[in-house]
Amino acid sequence: MTTGTATGAAKGTLPPRFSLVATDLDGTLLRSDHTVGARTRAALALVAARGAAHVVVTGRSVSWTRHVLADLGCTGLAVCGQGGQVYDAAAHTQLTSVILDRERARLALARIEAVTGPLVTAGDRDGVDGEVVAAPGYRLDLAGQVPIVLNAGPDALWAAPLRKIYVQHPVLDEDALALIATRAAGHLVGVAEAGPGEIELLPLGLDKATGLSYVARRLGLTGADTVAFGDMPNDLPMLDWAAHGVAMAGAHPELKAAADEMAPGNDEEGVAVVLERLFA
């Protein structure tokens, strides 16, 4: 990548050894069945043996990231909620929590719907046990893994503090929705593409690099010490911040175009393939 805030090693130039490994979850560290493969576990153990830290950086909220962290044996810090939640797994507490202004979000949705017609929404409530509150018709791919209130009435979405809003359309895909949302309401909210079929409305200026840079500072590290892995446009700020950005084989074209390196796909445990080379 050619831009970013990393200091020290030039972008695209590999330092002798990274001290921080940042990985997205879905489409990156996790396989399509939402599990972590044996080769990836061994590669993460190698990273730890070399004295480097691994930080999960995900769009998922804490409430549906905790079981993955527990499965990996992570007891340190994780970045959740598109950078809005920095979570201490050992203490089971949020170190940071960035809240969405609900009035701005209401206005943003109205301006987007003026272009697209009716949208289907869900809201991510704040807190380590925050629920997803979903309107009728909302499609949830991780049913059973997420604490969720289904078929919620229109007032339920706004009844408690929110970190972000998920937006779906019956016809438009995530690329088309993101373009419309950015043009219509990008001055009110952040717009993120984190997965197929939907976009997310976030507090303005929030992204994964926000949370990752906070964690790095606590560890005494910078972007120059970091290699980052991702697959969707919401990973772009994180890869740009890191000294070395790696896109998965199945990544969105926007991320592929910006990455320093391409890894095999998540089902081929591409994160492990790269880490084995960097840390051997």
Image: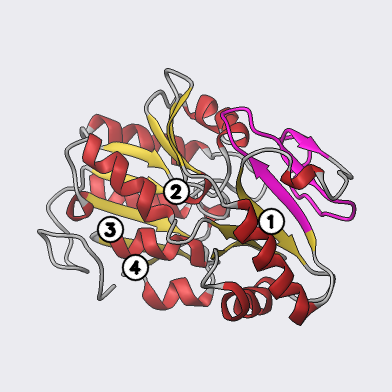
Asked if labels 4 and 3 touch by Cβ distance under 8 angstroms, the answer is no
At label 2, the amino acid type is: Gly
Mark 4 to mark 1 CA distance (whole Å): 30 Å
At label 4, the amino acid type is: Glu
Q: Secondary structure at mark 4?
A: strand
The residue indicated by pointer 3 is: 242
Residue in the image at 21% along x and 42% along y: 19
Residue 28, placed above or below residue 45:
below
Q: Secondary structure at mark 3?
A: loop
Specify the quadrant of the image occupied by residue 252: bottom right
The mark that comes first in sequence, 4 or 1, is 1
Asked if labels 3 and 2 touch by Cβ distance under 8 angstroms, the answer is no
The numbered dot on residue 166 is 1
Q: Position of residue 45 (x, y in %)?
A: 35, 32
Asked if labels 2 and 1 touch by Cβ distance under 8 angstroms, the answer is no
Residue found at the very far top of the displayed protein: 91
The numbered dot on residue 261 is 4
Report if residue 67 lies within the magenta region.
Answer: no
The residue indicated by pointer 2 is: 83
4 with respect to 118 (left or right): left
The mark that comes first in sequence, 1 or 2, is 2
Q: Residues within 10 Å of mark 1 (few under 14, many from 20)?
A: many
